Amino acid sequence: MENNKEMRKWLDDLDLPHPLVIAGPCSAETEEQVLKIAHDLKDTDVNYYRAGIWKPRTRPGNFEGVGAIGLKWLQKVKEETGLKTATEVANRAHVDLALEHDVDLLWIGARSTVSPFIVQEIADALEGTDKVVLIKNPVNPDLSLWLGAVERLYSADIKKLGVIHRGFSTYEKTKYRNIPEWQMAIELQSKFPDLPIINDPSHITGKRDMIFDVSQTALDLNFDGLMIETHHDPDSAWSDAAQQVTPAALVQIMKDLRIRKETDPEAEYNSELSNLRAQIDVIDNQLIDILGKRMKVSDGIGELKKQRNVAVLQSNRWNAILGKMILEGESQGLSEEFVLRMFKAIHQESINHQEKIINA
């Protein structure tokens, strides 16, 4: 799939003075609830009103959406407020019903993106549609899988495309519900700068008090918009209560967010920026040099272990290093999350080096 400006024409045509905003409840619960929230959002910066009609849950027994009847409520939203509507689809039947009820924007969820079979079924059902279609990142951090879903839809002659960055699952306990893995979103942007990218801080954070900070980070990284779950009574929501904000809170978030310029043409700024980037380049080269030297020491350890028939992994030593480096990192202003990820990567590379030597 070549980079194509046609993919973002739908967004450019909106000619927005602010980032695209998709907002509404995690789940459509009742007709009254759907319409109340919509009317609360009517005269705000919201461009698309979202509501989950079908809610695939991790385990059965939880609320899994009201089903097709909720689409009639979305039609009423459009009739009464003029807001465009959006919902998630996970199979051909969902697509057919959503199109029948004139939903304006459809998105494919993280659980669906992991399956090329599901994505292809949805692409076939949507072939040639003029609806906007957004693809959430897969649950696990797999850029190829994410881009593959975009390519399948583009090949089905669906030109109004975009992606949603909603974070990635991890077995590690972090402050996020789904870790952002910002670097993956940045890599996607660098490969396809004309592909609109929307941030979903609700699913990344899982907590309403973190939504502003993640939204600001997304805008600082030149994301095109935000999808924020909004409910008139969040604590009583039937699903994902902790991550939903009130319409009033959403308005305040949008008011407080700072929209950054992509660049500054002034010579002084560019001169200072070039100087700082040059310093970064020098330090990055030093980091690679240091890591190379570290791996040579690991090679020596591998040779010694091979001679003595000792196992590669030494858990006590590794745990001691990790604990020490977390404390050292904190003293340098580095987050525990960053230090953990960095040293786990270094440790894995060290293990790879030693295993190669021992098994040679």
Image (tube, rainbow, N blue to C red):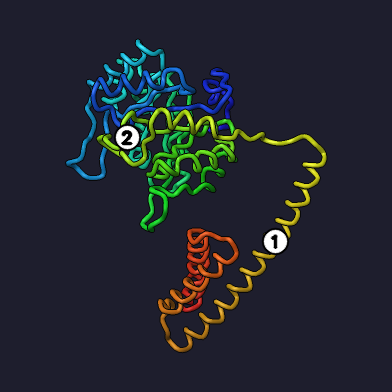
**Does residue 128 show up?**
no
Q: CA gap, disc 1 to disc 2? A: 46 Å
Q: Earlier in the sequence, mark 1 or mark 2?
A: 2
Q: Report which quarter residue 189 is drawn in.
A: top right
Instruction: Please indicate whether residue 55 sits to the left or right of residue 248 in the image.
Output: left
Looking at the image, do the residues carrying marks 1 and 2 touch, with CB atoms under 8 Å apart?
A: no
- Callout 2 environment at 10 Å: few (<14), some (14 to 19), or many (20+)? many
Residue indicated by mark 1: 283
Q: Report which quarter residue 268 is drawn in.
A: top right
Residue at the spot 36% in from the left edge and 40% down from the top edge:
243
Residue at the spot 36% in from the left edge and 19% down from the top edge:
103
Q: Is residue 49 above or below residue 242?
A: above
The amino acid at mark 2 is Pro
Q: How many marks?
A: 2
Residue 234's label in the rendered image is: 2
Rendered location of residue 79, percent (x, y): 35, 10
Residue at the spot 50% in from the left edge and 43% down from the top edge:
213
The amino acid at mark 1 is Ile
**Does residue 2 show up?**
yes
Rendered location of residue 179, percent (x, y): 44, 49
Residue at the spot 71% in from the left edge and 56% down from the top edge:
281
Instruction: Please indicate whether residue 100 sits to the left or right of residue 268 in the image.
Output: left
Rendered location of residue 200, percent (x, y): 44, 37
**Element type at mark 1:** helix
Rendered location of residue 186, percent (x, y): 56, 43
Instruction: Please indicate whether residue 176 sits to the left or right of residue 5 in the image.
Output: left
